[in-house]
Image (cartoon, rainbow, N blue to C red):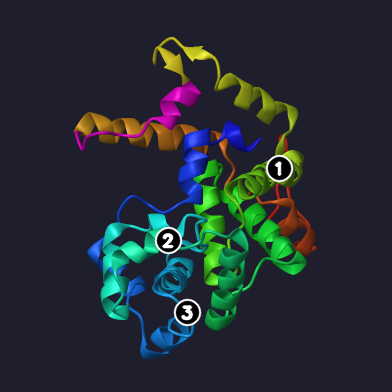
Amino acid sequence: MATRTYSDAELEQLRGFPDSIGPDELIRYFTLTVGDVAFVNSHRTAANRIGVAVQPCSLPWLGFVPDRVDRVPDAGARRLAERLGVPVAALAEYGGREQTRTDHLREVAEFLGWRSAGDLDFKELDQFLLARAIEHDSSGLLFRLASEHLRSSRVIRPGPVWLTERVAAARQAAQIETYTRLEHLLTPRRRSELDGLLDVDTELGSTRLHWLSNGATTASPEAIKSEIAKLRFLRDRVSTTWTCRCCRSNDGGTWPVSDDGPQPRC
């Protein structure tokens, strides 16, 4: 499911560091405080110190720590090496044992107040993604929003395949939820009008759906007239009193009935 959204190469990029880092991010995320330095220097050997130092910089920056810590952008490695007074080449010697990297990440997360995702975090993420998926259908955008949500909660981002599958599940749930909310509006007449958007209009030379989906590219009088025509077309076919079923259920009032069915008021 995940590879339908991202290729293997793109998934690999999502697991690692960006190729470079901008000057603002470099200063913001790769500036060690006195407390940071004291924590880092509690580890023995230059390789461990600079390897550990990369991790409290990576978590706030990326929301996770890549397995290959030694592939941090060169500017970040040089800045940390200078601050710690260790050779930057020592970073290449870090993390030979996977258990060492795991233990260090656990220490860093505790030091920064971050945590691994738990059941409650998964539930909150699913609820967040469902709400966003109702608003947006882009898998890439939802992935970024999910990553930002986890980072703002100081929850270490799981792997990209897991997160992409969570996004896919949210998109599917959003489709079901959207239909549930709109089902009462889909009267036979409106269904026919919606189907008609897919018919080619001889005057336009395209379907109405295509016409409505393409916005103006210039500020010419003709473009403005076209946009006004679209607005009039929609106003002729869309009732301003439509509402979703959740508003309808909370209203408790009586609504007028037209040929198109009940017209709810918020």
Where residue 1 appears, as percent x and y from the top left, is 66, 35
Residue marked by disc 3: 44
**Pointer 2 residue:** 93
Label annotation for residue 196: none
Contact (Cβ within 8 Å) of mark 3 with mark 1: no
Q: Secondary structure at mark 3?
A: loop
Q: Is residue 253 visible?
A: no
Q: Compared with residue 60, is residue 159 higher up or lower down, i.e. above or below?
A: above
Residue in the foreground of this view, choosing between 260 and 198: 198
- Kind of residue indicated by mark 2: Glu
Residue under the point 74% across and 41% down? 176
Alpha carbon separation for disc pair 1 and 2: 59 Å
Q: Is residue 97 above or below residue 143?
A: below
Quadrant for the C terminus in the image: bottom right
Q: Nearer the viewer, mark 3 or mark 1?
A: 3
Using the rendered view, name the quadrant where residue 219 is placed.
top left
**Amino acid type of disc 3?**
Arg
Q: Quadrant of residue 204?
A: top left
Rendered residue at 43%/9% (across/down): 202
Q: Nearer the viewer, residue 141 or 244?
A: 141
Q: Secondary structure at mark 2?
A: helix
Task: Kindly identify the residue that appears in the image at 45 percent across and 24 percent down.
Answer: 210
Which stretch did the figure color magenta? 208-220
| Kind of element beneath mark 1 | helix
